[in-house]
Image: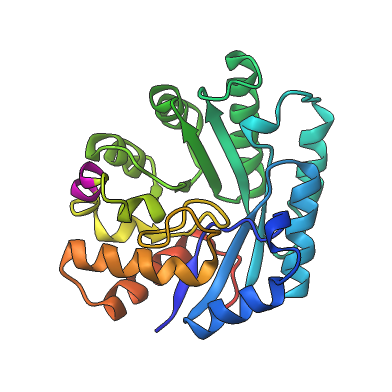
Amino acid sequence: MMWFDTHCHLFDERFQEDLDAVVARARAAGVRHFVVPGVDVQTSEAAIALAERFEGVYAAVGVHPESLADYRPRMLEEIRRLAAHPKVVAIGEIGLDYYWDVAPREVQREVFVAQLDLARETGLPVVVHNRDATEDVVRLIETEAQGVTGVMHCFTGDLDTAMRCIRCGFFISYGGPLTFKNAEAVREAAARIPAEALVVETDSPYLSPHPLRGKRNEPERVRIVGERLAEIRGLTAQEMADLTTRNALRLFTRVRV
């Protein structure tokens, strides 16, 4: 059985002491591919360093909306430079965050659109973050992301929102929240998403799935998410692993099998 964790922040300091063991546990659990998204220039560089260090690990590079407090346009020039690395498979993590609001919303939207343009220029997909900004995120995808594909990271929205993104050529990624006891609405949407749009992730070290909620998350637990998604959709774990890995490889075309 082969799983693909489409979103894990392995550069996080919580992995500093035992990263080799974390990756080994994931491999033992069947995880063969990992995408590590940066959230600013420094962590994008760190993601690339991890991709160079570990087989099967790939990087995404981008400026997260929570990293915009001291935004300067030169940051995007650095991201453009990093995107040329052969193990960079996406522009991300990018998007809008109206919960923390660390930067004015017009600045968030401007930088999001600029990075959608960069994805179009480089031919890379995007990894999209959305918190409390659904309508603006989807509207900008619909109006500004022509010719760009990508993934809605850690999706917890409704079916209508998912379908608007899918119609734009985007994939829907489920993580730990799919397994939470109070997430019945999330599971209802997940049951109806077109199969060809589904991928899975952990968002490690965050959002560990039930029954490990509250603990440091790890890529090995992507199988817990995948098994729950399989149960929701009436598939075996093997079928879900095959499906979501196949979809992830269609999304991240620079990944070598």
- Along the horizontal axis of the image, is 30 left or right of 73? left
- What's the magenta bit mostly, secondary-structure-wise? helix
- Bounds of the magenta span? 184-189
Quarter of the figure that contains the N terminus: bottom left
| In the rendered image, the vertical position of residue 210 relative to residue 156, given as above or below | below
Quarter of the figure that contains the C terminus: bottom right
Q: Nearer the viewer, residue 216 or 113?
A: 216
Q: Nearer the viewer, residue 85 or 18?
A: 18
Residue 183 visible in image: yes
- The percent position of residue 165, horizontal first and vertical second, equals 36, 39
Q: Residue furthest left?
A: 234
The residue lying at 53 percent from left, 67 percent from top is: 219
Q: Nearer the viewer, residue 244 or 185?
A: 185
| In the rendered image, the vertical position of residue 127 relative to residue 197, given as above or below | above
The residue lying at 74 percent from left, 66 percent from top is: 50
The residue lying at 15 percent from left, 68 percent from top is: 234
Residue 174 visible in image: no
The residue lying at 68 percent from left, 58 percent from top is: 14
Magenta segment: does it hold 185? yes
